[in-house]
């Protein structure tokens, strides 16, 4: 799974975890799926980026300290662009995770 908290340092990069290695919180938003891996973002960060297309990319460099890519000499990054008005009209609503369900 992928998660992006929007915090400082490592938390501002998307991080990849093995299933069950990271607990999703009740305020996390499911944005989509990357190669069969769910991608979550904190609600506060989602509110900031909700009008942008997020592209998860990989680049050479040191990965986040808890993310799976760290021993590979690469790191995940986010590239973004603002949706057009027409694209925003076509967006599906996001799913807010609730661990009690």
Image (cartoon, rainbow, N blue to C red):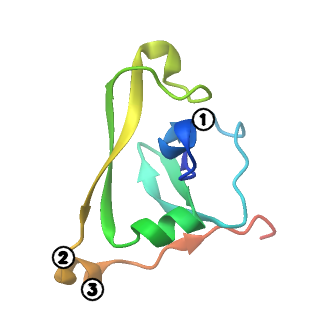
Question: What is the quadrant of residue 53 in the picture?
Answer: bottom left
**Location of the N terminus (image quadrant):** top right
Q: Viewer-nearest of labels 3 and 2?
A: 2
Tell me how far mark 3 sits from mark 2, CA to CA.
Answer: 9 Å
Q: Label 3 belongs to which residue?
A: 89
Q: Label 2 belongs to which residue?
A: 84
Residue 17's disc is 1
Residue visible at 65% across and 39% down in the picture? 19
Q: Which mark is first along the chain, 2 or 3? A: 2
Furthest residue toward right? 100
Q: Residues within 10 Å of mark 1 (few under 14, many from 20)?
A: some
Q: Residues within 10 Å of mark 2 (few under 14, many from 20)?
A: few
Residue 77's disc is none
CB within 8 Å, label 1 to label 3: no
Question: What is the quadrant of residue 44 in the picture?
Answer: bottom right
Q: Nearer the viewer, residue 49 or 37?
A: 49
Tell me how far mark 2 sits from mark 1, CA to CA.
Answer: 32 Å
User: Picture coordinates of residue 23 (x, y %)?
Assistant: 73, 48
Q: Viewer-nearest of labels 2 and 1?
A: 2
> Eyeballing the image, is 71 above or below 69?
above
CB within 8 Å, label 3 to label 2: no
Q: Is residue 91 left or right of residue 6?
A: left
Q: Is residue 31 left or right of residue 26?
A: left
**Location of the C terminus (image quadrant):** bottom right
Q: Which mark is first along the chain, 3 or 1? A: 1
Q: Is residue 1 visible?
A: no
Badge 1 marks a residue whose secondary structure is: loop
Residue visible at 33% across and 77% down in the picture? 91
User: Picture coordinates of residue 88 (x, y %)?
Assistant: 27, 80
Residue visible at 24% across and 67% down in the picture? 82
């Amino acid at each position: 799974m992928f998660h992006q908290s929007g915090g400082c340092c490592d938390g501002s990069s998307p991080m990849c975890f093995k299933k069950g290695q990271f607990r999703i919180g009740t305020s996390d938003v499911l944005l989509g799926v990357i190669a069969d891996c769910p991608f979550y973002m904190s609600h506060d960060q989602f509110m900031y980026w909700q009008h942008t297309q997020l592209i998860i990319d990989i680049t050479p460099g040191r990965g986040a300290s808890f993310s799976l890519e760290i021993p590979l000499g690469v790191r995940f990054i986010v590239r973004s662009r603002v949706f057009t008005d027409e694209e925003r009209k076509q967006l599906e609503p996001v799913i807010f995770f609730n661990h009690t369900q």
